[in-house]
Amino acid sequence: MRTLANALQRGKVHHAYLFVGSRGTGKTSMAKILAACLNCERGPTIEPCGKCESCLSIASASSLDVIEMDAASNNSVDDIRELRASVSYAPVSGRTKVYILDEAHMLSTAAWNAFLKTLEEPPPNTVFVLATTEAQKVPATVVDRCHRFDFHRPSVEQVASVLRRTADSEQISIPPEAIAAIARAATGSFRDALGTLEQLVTYGGSEVALADVLAVLGVADSALLEEAVDAVAGGDAPAALRAVERCVQEGRDAGAFAADLEGRARELLVVQTLAEVPAELSLTPEADAALAAQAQRVDGAAVVRLLELLGEAMEAVRAGADPRTRLELALVKAARPALDGSTPALLARIERLERGRGAAGDGLADDPPSAQDAALRSPHAAAPPAPGADSPPEPTDGDPSSAAGVAGTEVAEGPAVADLESLRSLWPAVVDLVRAQNALLGALIEEAEPVAVQGEELTVAFAASAPFLKKKAEDPLNRAAVTEALVSLTRAGRWRLHYELRGDRELRRSSAPEARSEEEWVRRVMEEFDAEELPGEQAPAGAASAQQPSAAESARAKPRGA
């Protein structure tokens, strides 16, 4: 508070101040310190003695010259009129009368209007201090008559330093890790931190241990959080569930453990992004080293996915779901993406395959590989090309790029999918990914297959008897959905899709079903959406039968029961 100190030293104290900040940041305490600086027998001074009668009465809240008013419960016009009446009296024992209005934003509009003139032209030797957590609710006509000071939320280290100083002055024995836990739980509030320390002294005396802090706060031990994150990153779902079981057995709430686990994952994400432990997260040298070490050994994608799943779990808990069930579900899905059928889970499985962990990383070694896994693990295991079809050239000893087309399946950057054979092997995975978002579109492109690739251009062919499917696939929205799935699975920059019709003999599908007619597709749409066919309008008498609408043209989808 350099500005306030200079104002006191130069005798330029303003008649009205606005202190803005979140709860527990010291707004009211600073107002009382300002009052002590103004009324100390040695003052005005920036270092009040704390021993004179004025300082002692202000500290004990018994001074007649320091009037503290709670605007949350005294927000009417009558309350402001009483304040205006008392303002006219001179100070009793000190030099200056100081009025402290806590939660000033709670005053009504009429009360502000009644207070405005007094605030603008107060009697001599009178100072107003308005403290608020919501400055946007204070009228602009009041703000521009005050000197505003913003109280920012302190860092964990700042809160910890206040706790250490208080513990030393009160002769309280408390280890550094316990102070760090209290400072973290205070979330930037000095008042909460000091209140917790007072509660701990009442709970266990002047000897405070880390176990006492965890018991009073109900937070999880950092070692338990580290164990749970390592279990998720390593694909060890049983170990993750055992961490939850230990937390519950120790009497802690599963919902609180989920919040603590989210905080730990957030810290890992910040450290991985900044490549260092920032001052905001710094606690003790041992804790900082453990956090940095875990950030190095845990994959960033696993941390992001854990954060997303924990957020979904906590949202479900707020909606009334069981906290432990949702937490365990989130941890299992994070550790075993194969159990989750969503698109992010599929991408997580692909990431694990690219890192070489495969099914062992998922903990599902006994499960048969899916179509996506098979395509990614053996992109060149497709059937031999049919006569006349495009096929990649055979690798030669003198052409390293050709050799890379065969051996590139084990490269860490991703599967080799730039050639036609790889794209054909990967096509079932593209179909499954599209089907997860749009079941009808997935069934539609299942009838096609890649037939040619040149750079970023991929040609996909339907049977010559399926022009209806080709027309639907060429819809801009459908084309964009297929392109997006193709890009996400091939790790290519972009693809340009072209659709065409080819004869059945030119397509390589060995066991694909026969092409469906337009009437069959109408029937399939009706089954998919539980619809029924409405009869077409009656044709005029004598009309030729050739003028009757076809089955596809006369079909009208109407939900049953409508």
Image: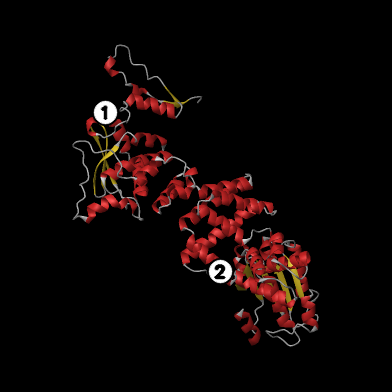
Give x and y (percent) for residue 395: 21, 50
Residue 506 placement, left or right of 433? left
- Could you tell me the amino acid type at mark 1? Ser
> Can you tell which quarter of the image residue 189 is in?
bottom right
Where is mark 1, residue-wise? 465
Provide the secondary structure element on which disc 1 rests: loop
Provide the secondary structure element on which disc 2 rests: helix
Q: Residue furthest top?
A: 542
Q: Earlier in the sequence, mark 2 or mark 1?
A: 2
Residue 460 placement, left or right of 264? left
Q: CA distance from mark 2 to mark 1?
A: 66 Å
Seen in the picture, residue 527 relative to 32 is either above or below; the reply is: above
Residue at 79% from the left image edge and 75% from the top image edge: 60
The coloring applied to the image is secondary structure
Residue at 68% from the left image edge and 52% from the top image edge: 249
Residue 186 is marked as: none
Give x and y (percent) for residue 121: 67, 75
Seen in the picture, residue 360 relative to 75 is either above or below; the reply is: above
Closer to us: 68 or 457: 457
Where is mark 2, residue-wise? 288
Seen in the picture, residue 247 relative to 507 is either above or below; the reply is: below
Residue 56 placement, left or right of 213? right
